[in-house]
Amino acid sequence: MSPEDLNESNQLRSHAMRVMGTVDKCLSCIYESDNVFKILQELGSRHVMDTAKVDYMDLIGPQFILAIQPVMDDEWTPELEQALSDLFKLIAHIMKASMTF
């Protein structure tokens, strides 16, 4: 797809909102590791049904960071970037594990 088509894609916009929802769910129960694990296992299983490729899970975090960094402007810090990177690595790890069973 061209950059213009991507910008107008309702499907991409919808997926971005679902990713944001997952981040919100994970952060809202971050101290309840069993809940986070369950959420991400179920999400990984749903991605298998949608025939998503396991390797794609590693791409979401860096793209998420690239998308929100300009919006955060002065509030963006190296610590925030590292925290988000770590969060998405955890998300990808758990989802990938549930996709390979």
Image: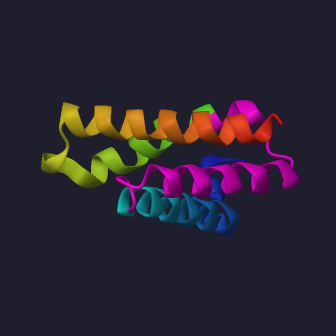
Q: Is residue 33 magenta?
A: yes
Residue at x-position 66% and y-position 69%: 10
Above or below, 50 against 98 in this view is below
Check the picture and name the quadrant holding the C terminus: top right
Residue at x-position 15% and y-position 49%: 75
Camera-nearest residue between 51 and 70: 51
Q: Read off the magenta span.
A: 29-57
Above or below, 2 against 7 in this view is above
Camera-nearest residue between 12 and 83: 83
* Predominant secondary structure, magenta span: helix
Residue at x-position 50% and y-position 65%: 21
Above or below, 67 against 8 in this view is above
Q: Is residue 45 magenta?
A: yes
| Image position, residue 76 (x, y; %) | 20, 43
Q: Is residue 41 left or right of residue 62?
A: right
| Image position, residue 20 (x, y; %) | 48, 61
